[in-house]
């Protein structure tokens, strides 16, 4: 099962390895707590001297098996599941940033992440500089400060569909002694593994393609194990200096390559919660078992639909990195050679009202606040997910007021196109 296993086999098989007489299918350990035989056994768990399950807020066998599957799919050393993608991104950053620290983030990230970093982290004393990935290296490097602790971007941005130059940003982050964190939600490890390009930490909203059916919220943090925290000891005291809440244990010394995920689990999860339920982890695992089959179909359908839209005279513009001539086509060829995702951004000629009339005329395709699941859906970010952002912020985030986000599902592409066509006709 180890190194040489293909991603397809990992999707189906990794994580849960039953022994003699145990359930073949990953069981749902719907239990908050776990039994031990004496007080000392339990005490050793609390001192992190032994590993084992003791309370589901920290770890649970169902959740743990799914985390291990995701770690293997990304090619990382360890992973932790969270109750949502928001929690994953928060913990990934908060694990190494504290009041007085600073991070750098691409300005085209998901609206929820933009608010988290720009507004909520600020209240905790952590400052974020949003940069435009089209700036020159010099312009971006000018954003680094002595207290910068990480750089953050999305492999494929939601909803703009911009492709992040992972290798370039990894080099810049490393030059300044900090890790690169990449949110790999849209690409999934089926289409891109950011660690292969130098990223250090990967995060996911598993609520999207990984779950794939829009049934459970979730998130994941994966560590490559590659970043040398000790080499930059003074920047990362939380990992490299004793934790008083564990009798002075030092994560890097006690856990080596597992330091980042161990700290996130035993410190952040212990203190802040955001634990996924075992039931949701089970549903996520069901989704993961077919991720390698669904992703190519999403991409194939999206390519067909994007090419259709591009040719349609009612359509003003289409942003899909699979299209020749797209600004991100070259980066997509490098990082996403087998396809990007099912998400297309496009605009119709006419006003915002025309866009709304078009969406209201769709029949099979529904308007939902979701993206990246089996069913094709649409959303108008300016009036839905991103309505908190000002026009100026929308522009900065690469979101035109007329942008329609179309998440292409795995129905028959002809039916998806037929629905779009009748809605274009009906909304004339
Ligand atoms: C949806 C999403 C999130 C937030 O995840 P939730 O599971 O909804 O909390 C974060 N990043 C990206 C890229 C997303 O698409």
Image (tube, rainbow, N blue to C red):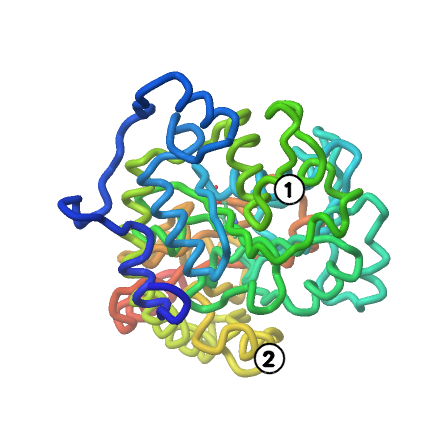
Rendering coords of residue 338 (x, y %): 43, 76
The residue positioned farthest toward the bottom in the image shown: 324
Q: How many neighbours does mark 1 have within 10 angstroms: few (below 14), some (14-19), or many (20 or more)?
A: some
Residue drawn where x is 44% and y is 42% of the image: 81
Q: Which residue is mark 1?
A: 253
Q: Residue furthest top?
A: 39
**For this view, does 138 lie left or right of residue 387?**
right
State the SS at label 1. helix
Q: Give the percent coordinates (x, y) of residue 76.
A: 50, 57
Q: Is residue 133 above or below residue 330?
A: above
Q: Nearer the viewer, residue 313 or 302?
A: 302
Q: Determine the CA span between mark 1 and mark 2.
A: 42 Å
Q: Nearer the viewer, residue 343 or 133?
A: 133
Secondary structure at badge 2 equals: helix
Kindly tell me whether mark 2's CB lies below 8 Å from ligand 1: no
Q: Which of the 4 image quarters holds residue 22? A: top left
Relative to 169, is 411 on the left or the right? Answer: left
């Amino acid at each position: 099962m180890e190194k040489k296993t293909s991603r397809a086999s990992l999707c189906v098989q990794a994580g849960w390895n039953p022994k003699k007489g145990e359930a073949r299918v990953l069981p749902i350990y719907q239990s908050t707590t776990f039994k031990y035989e004496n007080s000392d056994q339990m005490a050793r768990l609390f001192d992190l001297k032994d590993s084992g399950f003791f309370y589901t807020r920290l770890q649970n066998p169902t959740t743990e098996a799914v985390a291990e599957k995701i770690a293997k799919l990304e090619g990382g050393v360890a992973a932790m599941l969270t109750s949502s993608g928001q929690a994953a991104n928060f913990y990934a950053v908060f694990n190494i940033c504290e009041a007085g620290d600073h991070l750098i983030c691409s300005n085209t990230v998901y609206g929820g992440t933009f608010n988290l970093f720009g507004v909520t982290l600020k209240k905790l004393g952590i400052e974020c500089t949003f940069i435009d990935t089209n700036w020159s290296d010099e312009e971006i490097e000018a954003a680094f400060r002595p207290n910068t602790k990480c750089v953050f971007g999305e492999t494929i941005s939601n909803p703009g569909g911009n492709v992040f130059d992972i290798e370039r940003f990894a080099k810049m982050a490393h030059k300044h002694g900090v890790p690169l964190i990449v949110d790999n939600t849209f690409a999934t490890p089926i289409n891109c593994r950011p660690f292969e390009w130098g990223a250090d930490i990967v995060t996911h909203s598993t609520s999207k393609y990984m779950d794939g059916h829009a049934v459970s919220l979730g998130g994941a943090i994966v560590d490559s194990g590659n970043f040398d925290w000790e080499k930059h000891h003074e920047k990362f005291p939380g990992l490299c200096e004793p934790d008083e809440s564990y009798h002075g244990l030092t994560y890097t010394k006690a856990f080596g390559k597992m330091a980042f995920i161990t700290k996130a689990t035993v410190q952040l999860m212990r203190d802040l919660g955001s634990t996924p339920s075992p039931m949701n982890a089970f549903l996520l695992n069901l989704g993961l078992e077919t991720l390698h089959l669904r992703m190519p179909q999403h991409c194939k359908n999206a390519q067909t639909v994007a090419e259709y839209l591009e040719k349609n005279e009612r359509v003003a513009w289409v942003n899909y990195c699979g299209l020749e001539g797209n600004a991100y086509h070259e980066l997509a060829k490098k990082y996403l050679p087998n396809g990007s995702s099912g998400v297309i951004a496009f605009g119709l000629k006419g006003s915002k009202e025309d866009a709304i009339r078009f969406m209201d005329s769709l029949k099979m395709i529904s308007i939902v606040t979701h993206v990246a699941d089996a069913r094709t859906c649409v959303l108008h970010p300016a009036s839905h997910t991103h309505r908190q952002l000002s026009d100026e912020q929308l522009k900065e985030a690469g979101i035109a007021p007329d942008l329609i986000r179309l998440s292409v599902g795995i129905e028959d592409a002809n039916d998806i196109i037929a629905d779009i066509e009748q809605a274009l006709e009906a909304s004339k």
